[in-house]
Amino acid sequence: MLTHVSTITFSGLDVLDVDVQAQMSSGLPNFIIVGLPDKAIAESKERVRAALQSLGLQIPAKRILINLAPADMVKEGSHFDLPIAMALLGLMGVIKSEQLKGHLVIGELGLDGEILPINGVLPAAIHAKHHDMSFVCPARCAQEAAWAEVPEILAAPYLVNLINHLKGSEILPTPQKQINQNQVHYPDMSDVKGQETAKRALEVAAAGGHNMLMVGPPGAGKSMLAQRILGILPPMTTEEALETSMIMSIAGNLPESGLSFERPFRAPHHSASTPALVGGGRKGTPGEISLAHNGILFLDELPEFNRPTLEALRQPLENKSIEISRVNAHVTYPANFQLIAAMNPCKCGYLGTPDKECKRAPICAQEYMAKLSGPFLDRIDIKIDVPAVSPWDLSKAAQGESSAEIQKRVIKAREIQINRLRELGENSINNNAGLKGKLLEEICTTDNEAQQLLIAFADKYKLSARAYHRTLRLARTIADLQNESKILKLHVAEALSYRQSLYF
């Protein structure tokens, strides 16, 4: 006898088909799993045996062989428990083998027969929809699977419920799409006293998706400003939420309460390793830059990060994706994040502060800035100085604009960018930071005065082609905030003011 159950395995965000083949034959009693299973799969036979015993079913005392095809592909994960159990039930005649066709099955089994939640349900469900298959998953992952809009989802809390449904004695409820309704209250920009220049720069960065570096003494409000950028960014679209949720699902970070439309904000400690930041490990798991997809990656105390770790960000900052190559894995994750970084001007932190002037200036600052390479800084669009706030400003009541007011301008600028890109037939980019090639030349048109100013600056400071184009993108965003169709001299001047200190 031979039964087949369809399931999947993961290679990054890619979902690969696996055929679980079960065969029972005469011979010495044995239960063997082949097909390059990992340790979790090899141990699944004991979980499956215990789960079936909880239902009063005993595995026949025969030679049982489970093959995971294709046999030359490494399989990982505890989600193979349920498809292996279903294949055995087909062999034992508990359910008909024909009923297993057309179903994609994933789930981990508890010893009492409970179907436990697993990672990667959302991308697996989307894969099932693309192949016109029904989807079988744990009940606690049902809301996640519902977003894939699979025609039939069987989300069972226990193995007995799934068996009864297939036998016709029970009907499993159809899961409904739900959004995480937990209200998120972001810190408001009006709480920040002073720092008007930094607020303006943060608005420009949010409007165009530009990378930003804030430099200032301790306690100037750099982290406070960074934490408030989420409150001025546009809300996530459904497409962005699904992309981000797929990565969170693979990493096991997606909440059970439903899909979340909250933009990610990742702030790893400066002791984070390179694999933790860009992804990696034996299984090629996503790192912080992928978990920050469609959101913010905040790096505080930037020079304190290991230099190789920061250098590893250069490629994903440019390509918006990361390729992880390991002996056992070669995977690609999206990494369309916005980098917001903060640092002190020097090692002691007080360069340029009148009351606490650095005693080793300028050597202290030069040594500290030397930890950041030129190619890395070349990928920063905005570098802004954040001076210490005076006691007089701190004593006054906060009177600045609220995050909601700034967000309106940011949303309007983003709408201009998206509409312009859609008119040109570009659907993969949503902001000015992603403009490249002919698209950049066509959109970032300048008048003569603006062009002359940019050329003079580029010639004086020997800007690279990348820095030149990033300045153009930045000027385009500033023009969009003012609803100007062409980039003017004042837009270029403001863009250059945000980048000038990068070349001193």
Image: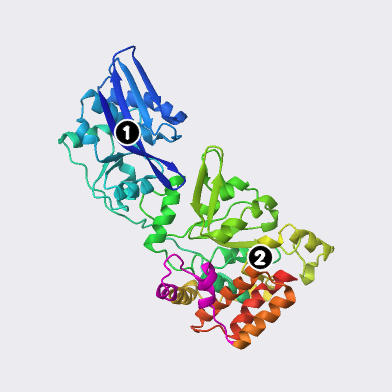
Percent of width and height locating residue 5: 29, 34
Under circle 2, the secondary element is loop
Q: Which amino acid does label 2 sit on?
A: Asp
Mark 1 or mark 2, which has the lower sequence index? 1
Q: How far apart are marks 1 and 2 (CA)?
A: 50 Å
The residue under the point 41% across, 31% down is 71
Q: Is mark 1 on a helix, strand or loop?
A: helix
Is residue 376 rendered to the left or right of residue 33?
Answer: right
- Highlighted range, magenta: 418-447
Residue 58 screen position, x and y as percent: 27, 19
**Does residue 70 appear in this view?**
yes
Label at residue 378: 2
Q: Image check: 78 left or right of 54?
A: right
Q: Mark 1 points at which residue?
A: 83
Would you say residue 139 sits in the magenta stretch? no
Contact between marks 1 and 2 (CB within 8 A): the answer is: no
Q: Answer with the quarter of the image where residue 221 lies.
A: bottom right
- Give the quadrant of residue 423: bottom left
- The structure residue drawn at horizontal position 59% and vertical position 45%, both measured from the top left corner, is 275
Q: Quadrant of residue 70?
A: top left
Question: Image height check: is 112 above or below 221?
Answer: above
Q: Give percent across and percent down for residue 158.
A: 28, 34
For the N terminus, which image quadrant? Answer: top left
The amino acid beneath tag 1 is Pro
| 231 displayed left or right of 55 | right
Residue neighbourhood size for the residue with mark 1, other residues' Cα within 10 Å, grouped as few (<14), some (14–19), many (≥20): many
